Amino acid sequence: MSYPFEDNPLNEYLLSLRLLDCQEYEARQELAKTDIQPIERAKWGKKLSTIQNDIKNLIKANELQSRTFDVFLGEKELALEQFEKEFPEPKKPNANCCHENTVIRLRDNGDKKPLVVSQCLSCGACKQSHKRNETKNWESLPPFDEALFKNRYSQNDHCWYQKRREIYWEIYGTEGIYPQFNSSSFSEEFKAIDLPPKYSEECKHSNTDTQITLRVYAKRKSPAVVLQCKVCGKHLKDIPKKEVPDIKRLPLFNESIVIEYKAEQSK
């Protein structure tokens, strides 16, 4: 039988926690004011500490004890458990490589410059990073062997995981599995019905149609110096502040250019 609606301990706990959260938010808002007097700041600081202790005590008082008995396992869970008992999971390779056979190589770092690292030739681990300016002729170093790095597991490890997957699918079948979805086919059909707007995210205008601006972000303490296209309004790149003599004289980033250009291109 369920708890009566008017006397539900879970609802009582959630309401109490919500009330304390609101009180904590109010205290933080008061402490964030710049014109608050020292006496008031001390008062709200003490109140915030009390509220936080009340929250900890409330959560601790409502903690549920973990079970001390075995959880029931169904046919599916028992089959996997039996497999893992007969064939224990292989130990994972040690993250701390102890081999001494290493070589300095260049590792791809996506869009940024490659990293200069030491790679173990025994297990493929990436052991140490090096500074490019302290590495002689770093541009001509051999590439990092990603295949050796990914193949740290032995063939037996791969066989174990493959066998476990086979048992899993044999037991579960298609239950709880998302149906296959051809995303590329759907995308082509959607584009044929609803043509994309003419506006492209890539700025194709001349570099002469740009200006250095000051862009203010809501979640950043200080504004950024950015290069903006004066035609489409696109944020082209960030510019180091040390390269600008006086950032206070810069014009603000014009968001209206972006909106107007998109509206014009979508007509």
Image (tube, rainbow, N blue to C red):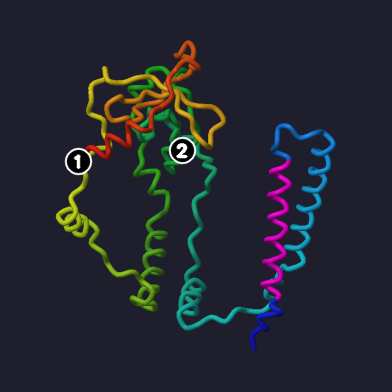
Tally of numbered discs: 2
Depth check, front residue: 169 or 235: 235
**Residue 21 forms part of the magenta stretch:** yes
Q: Is residue 36 left or right of residue 83?
A: right
Question: Secondary structure under badge 1?
Answer: loop
Residue drawn where x is 69% and y is 77% of the image: 8
Residue drawn where x is 41% and y is 38% of the image: 121
User: Which secondary structure is most common in the magenta stretch?
Assistant: helix
Name above or below for residue 165 compared with residue 108. Answer: below
- Across and down, in percent, residue 29 comes to 69, 43
Name above or below for residue 37 compared with residue 60. Answer: above
Q: CA distance from mark 2 to mark 1?
A: 45 Å
Query: Splitting the image into 4 quarters, where does residue 200 fall?
Result: top left
Name the kind of residue labelled 1 in the image. Lys
In the rendered structure, which segment of residues is drawn in magenta? 9-30
Pick whichever of labels 2 and 1 is earlier in the sequence: 2
**Residue 160 forms part of the magenta stretch:** no
Query: Which residue does the numbered mark 2 point to in the structure image?
Result: 126
Q: Is residue 36 left or right of residue 119?
A: right
Q: Nearer the viewer, mark 2 or mark 1?
A: 1
Disc on res. 198: 1
Residue drawn where x is 32% and y is 30% of the image: 233
Name above or below for residue 228 compared with residue 248. Answer: below
Name the kind of residue labelled 2 in the image. Cys
Disc on res. 134: none
* Quarter of the N terminus within the rendering: bottom right
- Across and down, in percent, residue 184 comes to 21, 56
Q: Is residue 191 left or right of residue 60?
A: left
Query: Splitting the image into 4 quarters, where does residue 198 fall?
Result: top left
Q: Residues within 10 Å of mark 2 (few under 14, many from 20)?
A: many
Query: Splitting the image into 4 quarters, where does residue 206 fall?
Result: top left
